[in-house]
Image: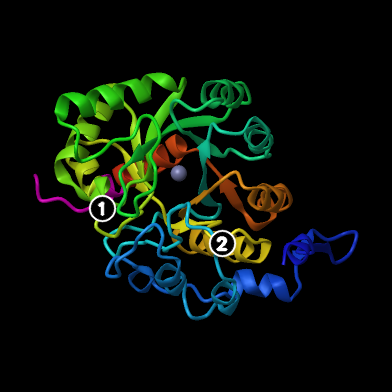
Amino acid sequence: MLVMLALLLVPESESEPPMLITTDMTAIADEPVAPATELVAATEPVSEADTVSSAETVSSAEPVAQAVSSTDNSTEPPALVVSPEEPAATLPPTAKMVLILDDIGYSVEAGLRAINLPSQITFAVIPHTPYGKALAEAAHQAGRELMLHAPMSNLSGMDLGEGGLTLQQNEEEFMQVLTAALADIPYIKGVNNHTGSELTAAVQPMQWVMQELKKRDLYFVDSMTTPDSVAGATAEQFRVPSLRRHIFLDHIQTTEAIDIEFKRAIALAQQRGYAVAIGHPYPETLAYLETALPMLAALQVDIVPVSAMLEQLRIVERSSETAAPTDAW
Ligand SMILES: [Zn+2]
């Protein structure tokens, strides 16, 4: 698949611009993308470790994803989450993709390899990790955007490490943990959740989080580890700019599976104007992105940092408000 993607750009003749050909291109261009309402996984329960049911949400049109079994339970599920109320952005002709790499901080080698990827990836760094600060510094030097990847309690019993936010903490403890985590990673412009299938479904702690983010002028990206998340709605209440994850690239860490998810992200971006994809610094993901990212320009897909995407959406929203008929005369 990766090799086939590499064959996407074959100049038809010396005098003409590259044409997008091969059957694999058909997979990108013609891959059926369900209408937003059909992509919603929100009615199905999703747990971080439930790879079977989450694989089913990927869509029956993709036998490869179903054929590949996952042995990894360490990350959030790949459910594609696009809510029916989420407006498509009208941003043609270039589609935008937000690409976030989570779980930065444990490996210098993987972190630096990720930072060297040739696109405006946004890096989500886990607090209190051995190399979180140093990698945030390196990413900042490379002109990349940074987020805090805040560990939040999950229903799968996965260890949160230091800096984990839980339902058991009272407000004072919760705020201490949150502010220490925010202080640990330099240059951050926002936060997303590491696991969090339990905590992001709880209103009170999400209010504590959003209140703090508003104070600090930070955004929130909901990783959508549960369909019951109230993070987005709470962010809206507190007027914290927010996005939600549509696609997990590498819940299944094979080139074939990553290829399928990446193409779904491209198709979604082309269809709706933008897509939000999250991956991890796995060797398979990094190797895939090293080959695939340089080809995005030819597909007219731009990788943009989260803050740029939020700004773009704000402009679109504002202009549509201006253009809307009003009876306020
Ligand atoms: Zn994570």
Q: 231 or 196, which is in the foreground?
A: 196
SS for callout 2:
loop
Query: Could you say which is closer to the camera, residue 92 or residue 156?
Result: 156
Quadrant field for ligand 1: top left
Q: Is mark 2 within 8 Å of ligand 1?
A: no
Depth check, mark 2 against mark 1: the one in front is 2
Q: Which residue is mark 1?
A: 229
Query: In the image, what residue type sits under mark 1?
Result: Ser
Q: Tag 1 or tag 2, which sits nearer the N-term? A: 1
Q: Which residue is mark 2?
A: 252
**Residue drawn where x is 47% and y is 54% of the image:** 275
Identify the element where label 1 is drawn: loop
Q: Label 2 is placed on what type of residue? A: Ile
The C terminus, quarter of image: top left
Q: In the picture, residue 181 is in which quadrant? A: top left
- Percent across and percent down for residue 89 are 40, 54
The residue stretch that appears in magenta: 320-329
Is 328 included in the stretch rendered in magenta? yes
